[in-house]
């Protein structure tokens, strides 16, 4: 985790109780889900994607696109929803993105996305919840 402090904080036991094992590995230990393993990669309804750790809205469905990477990809987050840190793991330098409210690791941002931003926010689907525009999923 980053050294920042966040508005939403939980103990390790609280995080483990709130998140699935895979979510905990991705969001609290900076893991990565297998590409193509999350149904949200194929979500096409209008709505909002939120942080699975604290429910903060992160992306609107209109900013989602098919990057062909196997992970949900977006070209623009909601204002103030994300924070960034430098990730120097695995012998490379990448820009990690995390939820600005709870600090949970979400994925990375790359400069190879579509207009108008040219950015690709490559996000682990297990780190997201989705609420369709017509109301909560049933």
Image (cartoon, rainbow, N blue to C red):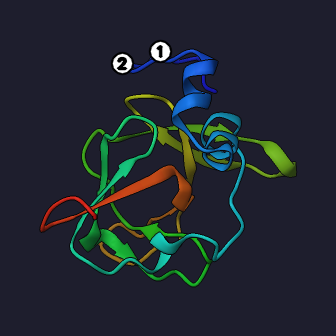
Against 39, residue 49 (above or below) is: above
Of residues 11 and 110, the one drawn nearer to the viewer in this rendering: 11
The residue lying at 63 percent from left, 77 percent from top is: 36
> Quick check: 25 left or right of 3?
right
Mark number, residue 107: none
Q: Quadrant of the N terminus?
A: top right
Against 96, residue 102 (above or below) is: above
Callout 2: SS: loop
The residue lying at 62 percent from left, 19 percent from top is: 13
Of residues 52 and 6, the one drawn nearer to the viewer in this rendering: 52
Callout 1: SS: loop
User: What residue is shown with label 1?
Assistant: 5
Against 40, residue 7 (above or below) is: above
User: What residue is shown with label 2?
Assistant: 7
Residue 109 visible:
no
Residue 68's quadrant in the figure? bottom right
Please give the count of numbered marks on the rendered protein: 2
> Quick check: 41 left or right of 28?
left
For the view shown, which residue lies furthest in the right direction? 91
> Quick check: 120 left or right of 27?
left
């Amino acid at each position: 985790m980053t050294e920042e402090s966040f508005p939403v904080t939980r103990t390790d036991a609280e995080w483990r109780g709130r998140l699935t094992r895979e979510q905990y590995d991705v969001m609290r230990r900076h893991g990565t889900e297998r590409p193509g393993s999350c149904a949200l990669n194929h979500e096409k309804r209008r709505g909002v994607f939120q942080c699975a750790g604290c429910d903060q809205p992160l992306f609107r469905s209109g900013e989602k696109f098919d990057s062909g990477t196997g992970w949900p990809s977006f070209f623009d987050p909601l204002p103030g929803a994300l924070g960034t840190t430098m990730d120097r793991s695995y012998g490379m330098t990448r820009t990690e993105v995390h939820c600005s409210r709870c600090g949970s690791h979400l994925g990375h941002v790359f400069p190879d996305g579509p207009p108008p931003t040219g950015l690709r926010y490559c996000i682990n689907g297990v780190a997201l919840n989705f609420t369709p525009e017509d109301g909560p999923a049933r």
